[in-house]
Amino acid sequence: MESGPAIFVGVVFALFGGGLLAWTAVRVRQRRPVAHGVSPVASATLAGLGSVIALILATWCFTRL
């Protein structure tokens, strides 16, 4: 992978994953729903899993440099 696209994609994944993880943590800490109409446990779990996957992908992109 060329370094330019790898850096761009890594930053996008890192910002998305970090933002989603922070937002989910704040919503759970305030005992507010993460997604409306869905079980609070299921929505927090899926959002947390999605953010961790995005951060793992960001790490993988940065190791490809």
Image: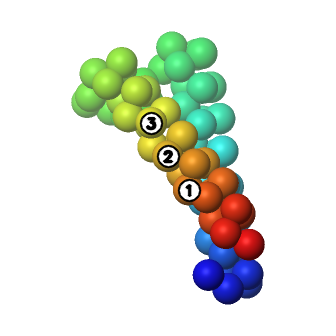
Quarter occupied by residue 7:
bottom right
- Answer whether residue 8 is visible to the viewer in this image: no
Q: CA distance from mark 1 to mark 3?
A: 12 Å
Query: Which residue is found at the position 54% from the left and 40% from the top?
Result: 52
**Residue behind mark 3:** 49
Residue count near mark 3 (Cα–Cα under 10 Å), binned few <14, some 14–19, many ≥20: some
Amino acid under disc 1: Leu
Mark 1: few, some, or many residues within 10 Å (few <14, many ≥20)? Answer: some
Colour mapping used in the image: rainbow
Left or right: where 24 falls relative to 6: left
- Image: 18 above or below 57: above
At 56% across and 56% down in the image, what residue appears? Answer: 57
* Front-lying residue, 3 or 9: 3
Q: CA distance from mark 3 to mark 2?
A: 6 Å
Q: Identify which residue is drawn at 65% across, 35% down.
A: 22
Name the residue type under label 2.
Ile
Which amino acid type corresponds to the residue marked 3 in the rendered image?
Answer: Leu
Q: How many marks?
A: 3
Say which residue appears at 55% left-offset and 25% top-offset.
27
Q: What residue would you read off at disc 1?
A: 57
Instruction: Name the element at disc 1.
Output: helix
Task: List the residue tagged with mark 2.
Answer: 53
**From where the camera sits, is residue 15 visible?**
yes
Q: Nearer the viewer, residue 20 or 10?
A: 10
Is residue 30 rendered to the left or right of residue 8? Answer: left
Locate residue 12: give its quadrant: bottom right
Q: Nearer the viewer, residue 27 or 45?
A: 45
* Cβ atoms under marks 3 and 2 closer than 8 Å: yes
Q: In the figure, 11 relative to 53: above or below?
A: below
The spot of residue 56 in percent (x, y) is 57, 48
